[in-house]
Image (cartoon, rainbow, N blue to C red):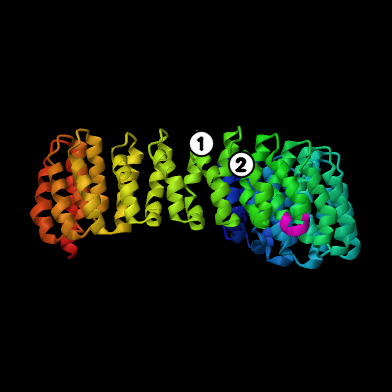
Amino acid sequence: MSMAEEPLYPIAVLIDELKNDDIQLRLNSIRRLSTIARALGEERTRKELIPFLSENNDDDDEVLLAMAEELGVFIPYVGGVEHAHVLLPPLETLCTVEETCVRDKAVESLCRIGSQMRENDLVEWFIPLVKRLAAGEWFTARVSACGLFHIAYPSAPEMLKTELRSIYSQLCQDDMPMVRRSAASNLGKFAATVESAHLKADIMQIFEDLTQDDQDSVRLLAVEGCAALGKLLEPPDCVAHILPVIVNFSQDKSWRVRYMVANQLYELCEAVGPEPTRMDLVPAYVRLLRDNEAEVRIAAAGKVTKFCRILSPELAIQHILPCVKELSSDSSQHVRSALASVIMGMAPVLGKDATIEQLLPIFLSLLKDEFPDVRLNIISKLDQVNQVIGIDLLSQSLLPAIVELAEDRHWRVRLAIIEYIPLLASQLGVGFFDDKLGALCMQWMQDKVYSIRDAAANNLKRLAEEFGPEWAMQHIIPQVLEMVNNSHYLYRMTILRAISLLAPVMESEITCSKLLPVVINASKDRVPNIKFNVAKVLQSLIPIVDQSVVEKTIRPCLVELGEDPDVDVRYFANQALQSIDHVMMSS
């Protein structure tokens, strides 16, 4: 190939690949656009590559999505910010395609490019693009236009700003619900760029139109706008314009709108201030907590702690607690589960007395709930209550329920209890733990479910770390060693697992005198699974014990296992022997 023809090569290859029937080849060439642009240079990228991409009418969404993504980071390859406008035509075309994810990515890339463009370029190139899309015949262009106004508006001259506000208002009244939805969801971003004088006049009028839309999918997006606009307005304006809308929405005929209100309400409380919250938003929230749709109650219950934090404890006790009591026995298990996941956070908000009198009975009823997820959500947050009421009360009231759950028929509930035990142990102290929970920890070592036995072994290690090796020597090691002769090989394997976890926590002397003989003895077991686990445990003990013990005790045992008839036993024994040799060489 001659030198004159060489620069043409990348674009020729790209054209061939983009016309290829194989989608993977087309995708790969799009993903290599930056490399091709570097090879072509900035000027040829502007004059050849970008026009070619503008005309490329690939019909595969995956290729178009990749192109929309690549063009968003293309400014350096076309010669910097002063030439950024050349990237707009291909992205404008992508803003009109039918596939939503392609349009969204094209809008995202346009926003990224527009935010870097110079002010006069925005007026000359970007704003006309927004106006063309907003006047597009096909609804997809108008949907995309809504997401670009917040980039175009700030740099527009006054006349153009008035026109842009007017165009946005028309989009909010578009015949197509999809366009109105897009306008509603982008209203907050657009409003943030509008001057405060026009915010009250124009934007609030647009907002009010959207809140009265006959499509619930538009109204529920307007709810999101409530929170965004509430933060932009002064509290008195927020009370005048946003508060009535939210109160109406909390009684909307569509449960999806009420669901959105339940999710957003606590953010609005911060915007309107304490007095309107007490007068208007608390009754609205109480209505949502008692809504006849379970989905709305789930959303409202999940926000109960956040909402209570905004209120005074007296208001929370007076208005919210009665609803919480009702929700704790709700007919929907998902409502109870949502409540259980946050209710513990109410304890610090309400204080000690209210927690003991009002919340503890609710905790107990949820701890005994027939649905496992409800019980799990309560168990995992017990520490929040402990900080408020103290360990004595917690142990008297909740511990019997915890002991009951430790034998729950759902293994995931037992697992959650086990994982919580070390935290509980550190809070209860060693004496209390020995009396009430010690036996349970050993009981789990012989559970029928492997995950429970494994978690129980880990639990013993964490307890040994918490209470120290001396305590473990008295309370854990003897009981663990008693189980080593269990008739079932799976339980014997659990003991080996526990030994491998406990050994690093215990002192080397205890490991050599108490734990190692048990492991060596297990190497004579008739079950191959036990024997290769012995080899694994011995390998884990090599760094812990003295070198002389490795040579006198561990190596002979591994040599013997290395001649075992079972291939797995031989493999793991040889692995462990290699470990010994490696340690010897490094020392």
Q: What secondary structure is found at the residue carrying circle 1?
A: loop
Tell me how far mark 2 sits from mark 1, CA to CA: 14 Å
In the picture, the quarter occupied by the N terminus is bottom right
Say which quarter of the image contains residue 569.
Answer: top left
Tell me: residue 6, above or below residue 441: below
Q: Amino acid at mark 1?
A: Asp
In front here: 380 or 144?
A: 380
Q: What secondary structure is found at the residue carrying circle 2?
A: helix
- Does the magenta run of residues contain 566? no
Magenta segment, which residues? 269-276
**Residue displayed at 42% across by 46% down:** 399
Q: Position of residue 492 (x, y in %)?
A: 22, 39
- Can you see residue 487? yes
Side of 381 where 44 appears, left or right = right
- Sort mark 2 into few (<14), some (14-19) or many (20+) by Cα contacts within 10 Å: some
Q: Which numbered marker is on residue 325?
A: 2
Q: Which numbered marker is on residue 573?
A: none
Q: Answer with mark 2 or mark 1, whichever residue precedes in sequence.
A: 2
Magenta segment main secondary structure = helix
How many marks overall?
Answer: 2
Q: Position of residue 225 (x, y in %)?
A: 76, 51
**Residue displayed at 68% across by 45% down:** 102
In front here: 56 or 187?
A: 187
Q: Where is mark 1, residue-wise? A: 369
Say which quarter of the image contains residue 192.
Answer: bottom right
Q: Amino acid at mark 2?
A: Lys
